[in-house]
Image (tube, rainbow, N blue to C red):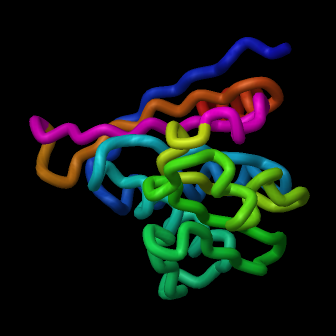
Amino acid sequence: MNAPATLSVALANETATAYLMADLALLTGPGDVIALSGDLGAGKTAAARAMIRYLADDPSLEVPSPTFTLAQSYDLPFPIVHADLYRINDPGELEEIGLSPLPAATLALIEWPERAPDALPEDRIDIAFSHRPALGSSARAAAITGHGKAAAQVERLRN
């Protein structure tokens, strides 16, 4: 098993978040899982939206928040599922929305992963977003951790 690799990044605004997610998109693909955590308004949906738009090569693509639908699917160069587990009360509900097991050969972007931690694979990238008000109202920080095989992706992101 690979040791986790961690990288911390300061994000001045949503544009910086979009650049980070574009860089990460170049290192991920079908079968990868990215877990996005943080308080309300910390940037989870903005990060997922930026990655999906980058992979679609369409900066104006409508990418709605999956808060109410729980999961949105995209058929881009490879399938992507963007899920929001905030309203999940029981891990068994993941099967009802097609996330248990996670779809094979699909990039999964999962917000609020702490609502169903046992559903996450060992090989994944966790991104924890946090507000940084001392640096400005739109400033955020991202702590990116690669677990298992995904540790190598985070190491490449560092370079």
Seen from the viewer's position, the closer of residues 65 and 132 is: 65
Residue 9: image quadrant is top left
Residue 68, percent from left and from top: 45, 73
Q: Is residue 19 something one can see in this rendering?
A: no
- 132 relative to 37 in the view: left or right: left
Instruction: Indicate whether 151 appears above or below 9.
Output: above
Lateral position of residue 60 relative to residue 4, left or right: left
147 vs 54: above or below: above
Q: Where is residue 3 in the image (x, y as percent from the top left)?
A: 73, 12
Q: Can residue 32 be seen in this view?
A: yes
Membership of 39 in magenta stretch: no
Residue in the foreground of this view, choosing between 81 and 137 = 81
Q: In the image, 82: left or right of 17?
A: right
Residue found at x 71% / y 26%: 147
Specify start and end residues of the magenta stretch as a single range.
Answer: 117-134
Which residue shows up at 61% across the image and 35% down it? 117
Q: Where's residue 53, x and y in %?
A: 57, 74
Residue visible at 69% across and 75% down in the picture: 73
Seen at 67% across and 18% down, the residue is: 4
Residue 156, image x and y in percent? Answer: 70, 33
In this figure, what is the number of numbered marks? Answer: 0
Above or below, 53 relative to 7:
below
User: Which quarter of the figure is the C terminus placed in?
Assistant: top right
- Is residue 122 on the magenta stretch? yes
Q: In which quarter of the image is the N terminus?
A: top right
